């Protein structure tokens, strides 16, 4: 299932959420609003929880591929959170730029696909997240590492710091999309 917001049909952001971190949760909500404010079309996805439990890699890639096929654009960026980062295969197959929030860097599938990504890539993770393993991110990819942040990119016990992390991530998403829009990324 997906929701779509129409903007420039030549620029498309596909949001692949986490298992329990939907496209309406703060990081993805503000990414969507940022893209829409900049004129992008946006599609956000949801998972069939049963299929996700049975075959997560196949299900995530099938749903993302269907969204990409449904709305082809001159420039498409995949923005994925947690389990959504298993879409690294779909992004690599199509040479798409990607923003990978709390990527599952301890997952064999995700790690194996990272070298195949082409174009600009941004990985965002916190040092307090057990699936964040910065050493697996290829050296030519951009990284935003947040000291102490957990898997939700929160600073446990510090609401003000969590809000600042949200601001920082949102600003980096906006800057990444702007860079892609100006032709430094290919789709």
Image (tube, grey):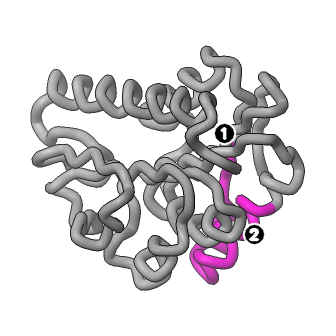
Q: Is residue 5 above or below residue 76?
A: above
In the rendered image, residue 105, in percent from the top left (x then y), is placed at: 35, 70
Is there any visible trace of residue 25 in the rendered image?
A: no
Residue 91, placed above or below residue 93? above
Q: Secondary structure at mark 2?
A: helix
Of 86 and 118, nearer the camera is 118
Q: Residue at x 61, y 15 (%)?
A: 37
Q: Is residue 53 left or right of residue 128?
A: right
> Cβ–Cβ below 8 Å for labels 2 and 1?
no
Numbered mark located on residue 92 in the image:
none
Q: Indicate whether residue 102 is drawn in magenta.
A: no
Q: Residue at x 14, y 41 (%)?
A: 156
Query: Foreground residue, 4 or 143?
Result: 143
**CA gap, disc 2 to disc 1?**
17 Å
- Secondary element under disc 1, as helix, strand or loop, is strand
Left or right: 173 as drawn, with respect to 13: left
Q: Which residue is mark 2?
A: 62
Q: Which residue in the rendered view is the most extreme toward the top?
A: 37
Q: Is residue 134 visible?
A: yes
For marks 2 and 1, give the one nearer the viewer.
1
Which quadrant of the structure image shows residue 92? bottom right
Residue drawn at point x = 77 percent, y = 27 percent = 5
Q: Position of residue 106 (x, y in %)?
A: 32, 76
How far from the left and from the top, in percent, is residue 26? 43, 32
* Label 2 crowd bin: few (<14), some (14–19), many (20+), radius 10 Å: some
Residue 89 appears at what percent x and percent y?
61, 72
Q: Residue 54: say if magenta.
A: yes
Give the residues drawn in magenta, as a range: 44-65
Dot 2 or dot 1, earlier in sequence: 1
Q: Residue at x 15, y 28 (%)?
A: 161
The residue labelled by disc 1 is 13
């Amino acid at each position: 299932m997906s929701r779509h917001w129409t903007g420039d049909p030549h620029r498309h952001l596909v949001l692949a959420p986490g298992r329990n971190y939907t496209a309406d949760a703060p990081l993805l909500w503000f990414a969507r609003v940022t893209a829409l404010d900049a004129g992008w079309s946006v599609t956000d996805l949801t998972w069939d929880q049963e299929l996700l439990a049975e075959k997560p890699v196949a299900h995530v890639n099938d749903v993302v591929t269907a969204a990409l096929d449904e709305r082809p654009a001159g420039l498409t960026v995949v923005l994925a959170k947690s389990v959504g980062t298993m879409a690294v295969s779909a992004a690599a197959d199509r040479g798409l730029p990607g923003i990978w929030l709390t990527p599952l860097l301890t997952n064999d599938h995700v790690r194996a696909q990272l070298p195949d990504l082409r174009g600009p890539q941004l990985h965002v993770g916190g040092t307090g997240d057990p699936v964040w393993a910065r050493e697996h991110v290829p050296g030519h990819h951009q990284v935003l590492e947040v000291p102490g942040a957990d898997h939700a990119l929160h600073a446990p016990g510090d609401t003000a710091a969590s809000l600042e992390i949200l601001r920082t991530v949102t600003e980096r998403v906006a800057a990444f999309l702007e860079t892609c829009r100006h032709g430094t990324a290919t789709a």
